[in-house]
Amino acid sequence: MGLNRRFAPVFLFLLVSLAQARAQEERPWWYILERGKLLFRQGDYGSALLAFEDARRQRYTLYAGMERDFINFLSTPEVRRIGDSLDLLETYIKDREQMAAAEILAELYYRLPREAYRNSAALALEELGKFKEYPEAEYWIGEVYRLEGELNLALGQYSKALAGGALLEDPALELELLYKTADLHRIRQEHKRMEETLLRIVNGNDARGRPWDPLWSGNAGSSGQFVRNSMARTLENSGPARFLVMYRYNNGAVEKAHRLLGLYYYASSRYNLAEEHLMFAFLIQNSILIEELQRRRYDYIFESLETLMDSMDRREDLANYMTQVDYYRCTYYLGSALYGIGKGSPARELWSFLGGREQIGEWRGRALTQLQRPSLEALIENP
């Protein structure tokens, strides 16, 4: 009895440890990922990395097992005689009460609409194989590497996550991945790759085939080019106030891509490209400010940049937004890009606007200098 008492605590500890280990094993991959996010936000990056890798491994194991079981099921003589029809396959599964196969089909239909498989068992099997990938886990592993300074490894993880973009639970994460990829290329001074990534945003589609920038991308076609040309002519010939009276575009998701491309092109003396992209960033920024004022004051009508600023009534949220999008910097370099393509009049209007804002510091000083002695600055600034 004495011996039993002595080992009882050890025995209980082992039971508890085994129970905890089993519970950990039974937790689904999505739960483990969420646990990893919590650890990440608490600054425990080592434990977070282990959790993200475990989530990736568990998802892979789950769907690899389903894939294997589905292959075995489809390979049985009776099922092979059915052919490729999912309709007939469903009837067979129901009539024969094939519960394991029914669960696999239920998972397939949960992940993608039934029509996505085009009534093809082979296509369903192909898609099932893709579900082994876990782009969210790849992204979060990349986040750990990024914060630890392993930028090359982080870029590799972001690339893996983007490759599985159609499987992302949150479609907005795909755009965030592209921005973070562009930012890492900028830090590594890989400016050509940064440019390519940002152009992928403004020219391309998401994994579901929807353009991020419908007015700019190839999907807009000749009508989009016509609108962009009309916008540029209005800005260049009638000035920024008339431009903002005539046009609105509040696609905040692509504002940063246009702004960074514009600054990059200005820094590399490609002023025509700089003007195009900075014009879009400027339009998006001001459209968002104007529409927010109209939302609060239904009778608000835009007249000029000066009255727009005066109408904000010390709105902290709008001031924070302007800081976030580098509003004054974007406006200043749009003026400089216009000057670079020989459009001095709208450039001076933008610089005059900045020169009249006493509280904006550096950009007021630069604008006043440009009004006195306009020039194309030789300084190359990192976007």
Image: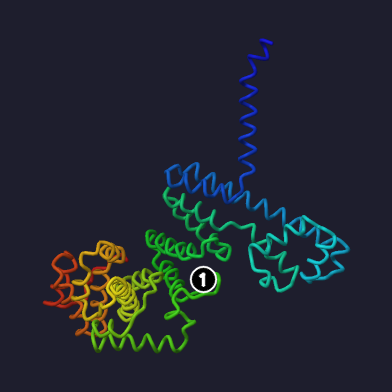
Of residue 206 and residue 301, the one placed in the foreground of this image is 301
Which residue is at a point 54% across and 44% down the rendered structure image? 50
Q: Closer to the camera, 251 or 200? A: 251
Position of 180 with respect to 106 (left or right) is left
Q: How many marks?
A: 1
Spot the residue most to the front. Answer: 298
- Amino acid type at circle 1 is Asp
Residue 120, position as x, y percentages in the image: 74, 71
Residue at (18%, 65%) from the top-left corner? 360
245 versus 69 height, above or below: below
Q: What kind of element bears circle 1?
A: loop
Give above or below for 156 relative to 37: below
**Mark 1, other Cα within 10 Å: few <14 / some 14–19 / many ≥20:** some
- Percent across and percent down for residue 234 are 29, 88
User: In which quadrant is the N terminus drawn?
Assistant: top right
- Coloration of the structure image: rainbow
Tell me residue 315's x, y (percent).
Answer: 24, 64
Q: Quadrant where the C terminus lies?
A: bottom left
Res. 353 in view: yes
Q: Position of residue 166 (x, y in %)?
A: 57, 66
Can the viewer see residue 268? no
Q: Which residue is mark 1?
A: 206
The answer to which quarter of the image holds residue 127 is bottom right
Seen in the picture, residue 309 relative to 130 is either above or below; the reply is below
**Among all residues in the image, which is located at the extreme top?**
2
Residue at 54% in and 53% down:
137
Residue at x 78%, y 56% (from the top left corner): 99
